[in-house]
Amino acid sequence: MTMKKRTFVSTALAAALMAAGLTSAHAQQTFKFTIASSHPTTLPWVGLMSTLFVPEVTKRVEALGKGYKIEWKEAYGGQLYKMNATLSSVGSGIADIGWVFANLEAAKMPLTQFATVTPFASGDVRTLLQVANEMNEKVPALKAEWDKNNVVFLGASGVDTYHLFTKAPISTYADLNGKKISAPGAVGMWLKGSGAVPVDGSLTSYYTDIQTGVSEGTISIATGILPNKIYEVAPYVTTVDIGALYNGGMAINKDTFNALPPEVQKIVKDVGLEYSRVLGDTLMQRYEAALKAIGEQGAKQAVPVKIAPMAPGERAKWAKTMPNIASDWVKANASRGPSAQIIRTYMEELRKRGAKPLRDWDKEL
């Protein structure tokens, strides 16, 4: 669906300037943007949309000195759409700019799932986002997935490393057998071979799902578990370090983007990358603090929070026992683009930046 242009020119002011002979003056032009997310601002990748992206774009656009102004409508926390409609909502113009939860868009963005099928690669989300931003710029097949959904990629988002948060203790890999474990979309693949049953969900649904028995815990992130207080129903925290994850990013509706002057387009894209960089730094800073806070805040509840690492050797067993999901993914997407090369590029770029993957997925293709 093609959006109406979101810009308008103050014709009265323009006419007045022309009548006065002030042809060199700039008539005011206002750009109206709706920015939205399925998740709340308590989560860093959403909060920075409001605290960094919105004011920084506003400041830089006004600093151009061309009479440009921006009017924002901010609608976070699922006000306009839910987690299963992030891509379509930005693509159709329900929001001009939004956070796209690519992990839940495997059908429409199959090649963008490359990080999901390479767990245990790196716990440093800053590194992952650097690589993801570079790949979305330089790999035509990845750019095309955003383009065909009528959106323009602005900056990668991600999350800190994944652990287990469960109702009952999980010490060994074998303890997962038979357990119902919540995970967002394709992340459920990480349970293949364990005997656990993946239950689709997200940070907005985990608390209720675990509380009501839909699942018995979740593979998730400390920075998301803390603000949603999921530790209240899943007090056993098993630190596994499955890896940080590139999960999507900010995007702008392509029609909205194309209607902007080139200098404003550049600002929007530049600030999108700045958002991504700051998000990586923020997540690394908050990760340890979040894990500590979960322990402290959950210490006095009915079932106190207990944080413990997975038993020695069990993390490696998980990584090595998992079916070759990267190879399976490459074969399944061979007709859609250079899937094997995408995996190789991703793993090579991680290693160049110092990552030491627990499993070399690219060498098993």
Image: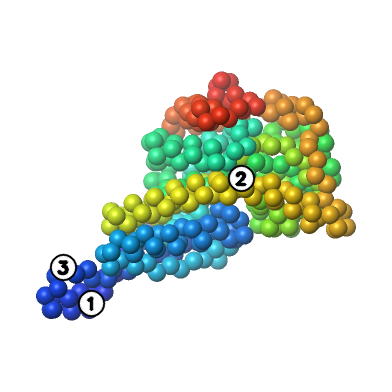
Q: Compared to 275, does 193 lie above or below?
A: above
190 or 349: nearer the viewer: 349
Q: Residue at x 66, y 47 (%)?
A: 287
Q: Which residue is mark 3?
A: 24
Q: Amino acid at mark 3?
A: Ser
Q: Residues within 10 Å of mark 3 (few under 14, many from 20)?
A: few
Q: Amino acid at mark 1?
A: Leu
Q: Nearer the viewer, mark 1 or mark 2?
A: 2
Distance of label 3 from label 1 (alpha carbons):
13 Å
Q: Compared to 194, does 301 lie above or below?
A: below
Give residue 186's position: percent from left, percent from top: 61, 41
Considering the numbered disc 1 on the image, is that residue within a helix, a strand or a loop? helix
Q: Let me know if residue 28 appears in the view.
A: yes
Q: Quadrant of residue 68?
A: bottom left
Mark number for residue 242? none
Q: Residue at x 65, y 57 (%)?
A: 204
Q: Compared to 168, does 88 lie above or below?
A: below
Q: Residue at x 43, y 32 (%)?
A: 337
Q: Residues within 10 Å of mark 2 (few under 14, many from 20)?
A: some
Q: Is residue 234 left or right of residue 219?
A: right
Q: Which residue is mark 2?
A: 284
Q: Quadrant of residue 17?
A: bottom left
Considering the numbered disc 2 on the image, is that residue within a helix, a strand or a loop? helix
Q: Earlier in the sequence, mark 3 or mark 2?
A: 3
Q: Which residue is mark 1?
A: 13
In the displayed image of the protein, which residue is found farthest to the right? 302
Q: Is residue 163 left or right of residue 102?
A: right
Q: Residue at x 58, y 20 (%)?
A: 364
Give residue 275's position: percent from left, percent from top: 48, 51
